Image: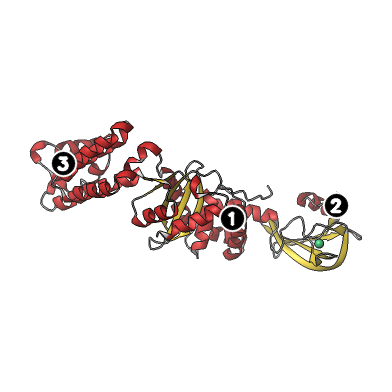
Amino acid sequence: MKDTELFEMALGLIPPWKVESSEFNPETKRLDIMIDFSRGGTFSCPECEKENLKAYDTELKTWRHLNFFQHEAYLTARVPRVKCNKCGIRLVDVPWARASSGFTLLFEAMIMTLAKAMPVKTLASFVNEHDTRLWRIIHHYVDKGRSVADFSTVQEVGFDETSSQRGHDYVSVFVDLAGPRILFATEGKDSATVGRFKKDLLEHGGCGENIKQMCCDMSPAFIKGAREQFPDTQLTFDKFHIMKIVNDAVDEVRRQEQKDRPELFRSRYIWLKNPENLKKSQAQNLENLTVKKLNLKTSRAYHIRLNFQELFKQPPLLAEAFLKKWYFWATHSRLEPIKEAAYTIKRHWNGVLQWFKSHINNGILEGINSLIQAAKARARGYRTKKNLIAMIYMIGGKLNFDLPT
Ligand SMILES: [Zn+2]
């Protein structure tokens, strides 16, 4: 078997395409494979697919292919232009690359696989290409995958913001909670993000009336956006965010009280964790600090927090009565931060109780967010938010990139 035949098999070439020659340069560590087509070979028009067209003339093109061990491999071919009655003179499609890409499909498939697992910058130096060229590949496949994504069955949507660079900029992420999959990601955390999501949902066969339930935090911008864009949708406030409001209030009580009560020093975490998650020494410390005669405000706040947590264990029919009782207790606690937390919950009453009907939360978004943060940490310097958003779709969009394997 000749080496040209070997390369033909490796590349999966079918007539009229064939490998003409190959040249290996040990100094530049480069392998060049020259591809050509047989005399008299015919091609189809790339526009209308009309067959049996002869080459009108040719253009010489080169594509980066998968490395051959540590050597960069390139394919070079004379690509014919055909003269189609209907479409005019057109460059034909070659089976190993998509139109106007400088890479073969297999090279692009490798990039798409590795970009999920390693920083694009590292990947770029690994394959000796500029990272903007790799980002171009990623954007192409993400856009292609998103163009055929179908949102017609989406009924429950959770959304939340994630910080992009160093916490200054934000990207809001919308998730199909049943998927779960990322539907949409967009810059900002204002109410307009929900409008952009609605537009994108409609463009993907979804429909506002289909969305029965939405879940978000208590951010006024998100609430406003949801009410405007999805007036018939029931809003559930994410219970982890609700719990955080009460938790933060306990922490604030402790912070204020600590100024006069040195025994509270370095006790922060024992009040924030649940008792069953404490280490033995922490549990002992908690026991010492919660004895009645110490009469610590922090201890009272802590018990109000523990009681609030019980809300989510109530049977649906008793939930509102339970929350009312808790509210009375919290607002009569004479602990300002706890009272503030209770007022916040009062203002969001229906969306807090909606959980007993919808049973949805944004836990899945927390998981996705940690993936995003990990990807960011790995890929310092996304250059642009557009790149970050493409990466978010790659991680969680469950898109079909339709790549060769
Ligand atoms: Zn044509």
> Which residue is label 3 attached to?
300
> Which residue is label 1 attached to?
142
Report the side of 145 relative to 154 (left or right).
right
Label 1 environment density (alpha carbons within 10 Å; few <14, some 14–19, many ≥20) = many
The disc labelled 1 sits on which kind of residue?
A: Val
Report the side of 369 relative to 286 (left or right).
right
Report the side of 5 relative to 255 (left or right).
right
Q: Residue 166 at what x, y percent from top left?
A: 39, 61
C-alpha distance separating marks 2 and 3 = 84 Å
Q: Earlier in the sequence, mark 1 or mark 2?
A: 2
Above or below for 280 versus 80: above
Q: Quarter of the image holding residue 128? A: bottom right
> Which residue is label 2 attached to?
2
Question: Would residue 281 be seen by someone viewing this image from the given angle?
Answer: no
C-alpha distance separating marks 1 and 2 = 39 Å
Q: Quarter of the image holding residue 61? A: bottom right
